Each structure stands twice: as structure tokens, then as C-alpha cells.
Amino acid sequence: MLKLHTLGKRYGSRWILRDLNLEVLTGECVALLGPSGCGKSTALRLIAGLEHPDEGGIELDGRSLDGIPAERRRIGMVFQSYALFPHLSVRDNLDLGLKIRGMAPAKRREQIDAVLSTVQLVNEADRRPEQLSGGQRQRVALGRALLRNPSVYLLDEPMSNLDAQLRDELRPQLRRLILQGPQPVLYVTHDQQEAMALADRIAVLRNGRIEQIGTPQELYLKPATRFVAGFIGRPQINWLKKTNGACIGIRPEHLRPDENGDRCRLIGREWLGANQLLLLEGAAGQLQMLCSADLQPGENLGVSWSPQDEHHFDPISEKRLSRS
Amino acid sequence: MAMVFGWPMLRYSWLSMHASSVLTGLEPVSNQGANWIRLLEDARFWQDAVQTSRFAALSVGLEIVLALAMALLLDQRWRGRGVVRALSLLPWALPTTMMALGWRWIFNTPYGPLEQMAQSAGLSPLNLLSNPDWTWLATVMADVWKTTPFITLLLLAGLQTIPDDLYSAFRLEGGKTRQALTAITLPLLTPYILIGILFRTAQAAGVFDLIQVLTGGGPAGSTESIAQYAYLNAMRFLDFGYSATVMLAGFVLLSLVIFTVAVLLQISGLLRPLKS
């Protein structure tokens, strides 16, 4: 189990991470989700021992990591850039750490061969990273992390450099190789769909602080702050224009055409395949609606929604207002 | 290129097959390769070739080592790095003739600061500019001072292409900081180092202005470069045919070396920066 308590890091007088409390349980995958610059990668670097916290501490399986150097933390880390050594073959990339740790050559070979077949790169063993596709490179990086036999996995945007198709291919591999294992996994990403798809729980970070921690369902159904409501869910939530200053959001998928609803004019649309995303202009401002009906721009239509699908937030504190 | 390189090369080739000196009234008269036979037997040319080579080899060697140290230092984050980075470029920005005059003063016997220091330390006079065995080292020193910043800049640019993540990954694998130098930095910097060597070798082999101002080729011709010998033949001895031959021979020798090395490096792939 990985436990972070009141973890904080600052550069000069600026805190880029503050008061981070988080537990990642055995076998669990927690996603650290947030826009770039929110401090999520810094959190990983603190846990890995690549940087030192200015506040708080880190525990791994009940033992504090304070003062334990990076290489002795038993951490399997995967970088967005893959961080493979470009002048070494796949095999030598995997071998480097084992050699430094002083493992016998025969044993090294045996372990590397096993990992190569696990990540399905047996035929690529003698190639250099630049001769591999992005997906293959990231599998080498996964292999390197596996070889460390770590107590925790830290994945830093492992799929952000890959195109959509490669991501779809790598996702099941990631599940099979790492997420289904017993080690806790901390997964940093700025992609909410990736976080929703892979993580058991998501911690949403903003400006170095946690906005909300919860399962993907909790974050989607009951966002704790206005920020989380806007960050989770695609297409983005609609914010209703209200004269009284109230802050009310309604998701595009919860709007429906209704003859008796608010009158809106259709000003644009995106065809998504199974349905369409309609851009509407009405009394409540601009609204996005997911809808299967085939409508032409310029048409007028009525729109309504069920009040229980509305998300209400305090306009000042931006916190969720609970409604009975 | 055709005007400043192509045409002069053609003209030199043609001229090297002719006698064109005071004896011919400066009119080119064909002499069936006599210039080239004279060159092969000209001890002064070959001595200059050796001198130019050792000057280039030692200068470039020292420059690479110093520039690597400088670049590694300037790549680290520390207070005042920006100022030092800017200052370290100054020698390179100075006109060669000016800085050569400066060094001539530094080496001056008995008034130069170096000589003064030696005297106050109780040493016998160094005579750095009048010792046929040692003066070439003074020219190397001045050249190193002037052109190390150029290579530093090149290597600094190379260092910045190495992603920080590689060092992080290396650390996580248990590598020590000093091991990273040989395991990551040097292999990935190799293309930049080699290009620096090629560039600077070509430049140093054509050295003229620095030596002309600092020593004038002396003492006893010990620091004379091929370019200077060609210059003397043309401007002092008014022997244009032979000057063209010397220039061309120097050029051919240098291009043979540079071209062969560059082709070999290109084939081996060592000149290509590797992507991670």
C-alpha cells in the first residue's frame, strides 16, 4: 500500500503541490488527473525519490520512504517520453539496471527473455528504440518497470505520446501486465477518458491541490466542485445562464428534445456516428446536446431536462450544493 | 559558391600548371607540372604541413576536452550561470587579429604579464615567442582560448537535446551521477563532438591570421602554416604559380582527410543524433 500524507513541494515560494493525502491500496489503480501544471507529475517524482518533498511524507507498505534514495525504493516507473536509452538495443535497455544491480549474466539473460516474451518483443530484442513504433517503445519501458519487480508502479502519462489507435492497443496490455497485478499503481494523466477507463479511483488535481477523490462513477455523478464537473465528462457539461447568479450545470447527454421545453435555435452540429452533438442557442445561453434525431441548422426546437440531473454549485466557493 | 570557391579553384588549378612570377614578367607560362615537382621536393612546404597538422591536432584536441568540461558546467543550474554563459562567448566574438595582438603582449619578453609572473617567481625568462621548440605551443594556447567557446556552444546545444527523463530513468535503475556521464551523456553527445572536431580541424588547418599577427610564422619559420607559405609565395616572392600550387596542395591534403573521415563517420551512423 502506498500512502501519501500532507505531501507538499514548492519551488521558491510557490507551492506546486500542497496537502496531498492519498492512499493507493494493494491491487488498486488510482489516477492522478488534472490539467498540465497541476502538480501531478511532481507528485510522482516525489514518490520516486527523484525530488524531495518540502512537507509531509510517503509510506510504502507501512515503511517511510524518507531518506531512502531513488534506486532503493523498489519503484517501477514509466515515463511519457518512454525514457529509453537511444544508443542501446532493446535488450541492453532492459539489461542496464540488472547489470548495475550486479545480477549474474545467466540470470539476467533468463529474466530479460521472460520479460521480452511477456511484452511481445522477442523479435525486436536487438533493435534500437528509434527502430520501434511508439507502442513498442512504451512496451519496452513497461518491460523495464516489470524487471524491477517493484512494490509500486508509477505511470506518468504513459500513453500521451501515442495516437488513438495505439492507445487502444496498449490499454489491454497495460491492464494485463500491470493493473491486474497486486502492486498499487499510481497513474498520472490529463486525459479524463483514460482515467475513467483504467482507474479504480480518480484524484482530480488543480493548482497542486486535490479537488476530489472518488470512483469514476462518483466523479461523474456527484462532482464535488465546479472544476471537477467541467473536467469529467465529454462533451463538457453545460453551464446554464441564470439571472440570479446561481451556478448550475447540466450534461449534454441529459438534455432531450421536448415540444414543451425551452425554445432553442440550432446553430451548429457535429455528427459523431451513433448520435449528434447539437449546439443550441436559447434563453439559458449556449447548450450542447447529444441527440440521435437528424436536425438541420437553423431549425428551432424545444429542449428540456430533468431537474435531478442538474448539478448545483455555490457560485463563490464553487463547491457542490447538496439538494434534497 | 561558384564565384568565391568554384572559380578560384579552377583558376588555381590552371595557375599551378604555369610559371607566373617576376621571372616571367608575371605572365603565366605553361611549365608542365614543374610546380608540383618542386612542391614534392620542397622541405619548407612539408615542414609547414607537419607544423599545421600538429597545431590543428593539439588545438582541436584541447578545445574538445575543455569545451566538454565547460558545456557540462554551463548545463548545470547555478546562480549567475547566464552571465558566465554570455562572458564565455566573448573570446569567440573578438576579431582574431585583435585577440592575437593581446596574446602577443601577454607573451611579450620581458614586459608581458606572463613573463613578469615568471620573473617574480624567480624563473628564467620564458621567451615564449622566440623559442623555435616552444613557440608553436603559444599559438595553440591562443587558438584554444579563442575557439573553445565555439565548441562549448555546439556541445551545450547537444547536451540540451538529451531529455532529463533519461537521467531520471538511469537513477531509478541504480546508476550514479558520474556513471551517467559515460553511460548516457558521452554516447549521445558523440555526433556533436565529432562535428565539432571536423569543423574545427578544417578551420585550424587553414589558420592564417592568428599566426600572422602573433608570430609572423617565426621564430625560424617554426610556426609557419601552409596558408602563410602560400601567402608569402604570392605576396612577397611574387611567385603566383607556385603559391597556387601550395594553396591547392594544402587544400587537397585537408579535404582528403576531412572527406575520408566524414564519409566513414556518415557510413557508421555516428554523425546522426539518436532519438529516444
Image (tube, grey):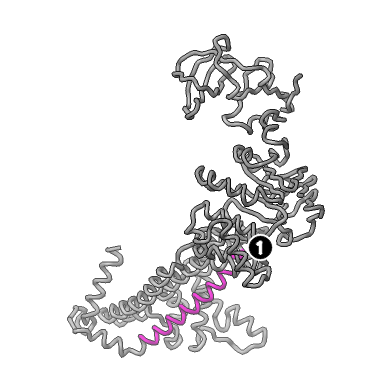
In the picture shown, does residue A123 fall above or below B29? above
Q: In this view, does A130 lie to the left or right of B240?
A: right
Amino acid type indicated by mark 1: Glu
In the picture shown, does residue B31 fall above or below B6? below
Residue at the far top in the pictured view: A260
* Residue sitting nearer the eye, A154 or B130: A154
Which residue sits at x=57%, y=12%? A262
* Residue sitting nearer the eye, A124 or A299: A124
Residue A117's image quarter? bottom right
Residue A286 painted magenta: no
Give the mark count: 1
Which residue sits at x=30%, y=65%? B4
Segment colored magenta: B45-73
Q: Which chain carries label 1?
A: B
In the picture shown, does residue A299 fall above or below A125? above
Place of residue A204 in the rendered image (x, y in percent of width and height, measured from the top left):
69, 38
Residue named by callout 1: B173
**Would residue A312 be visible to someone looking at this image?**
yes
Which residue sits at x=57%, y=79%? B112
Place of residue A106 in the rendered image (x, y in percent of width and height, measured from the top left):
62, 72
Place of residue B34 in the rendered image (x, y in percent of width and height, measured from the top left):
23, 86
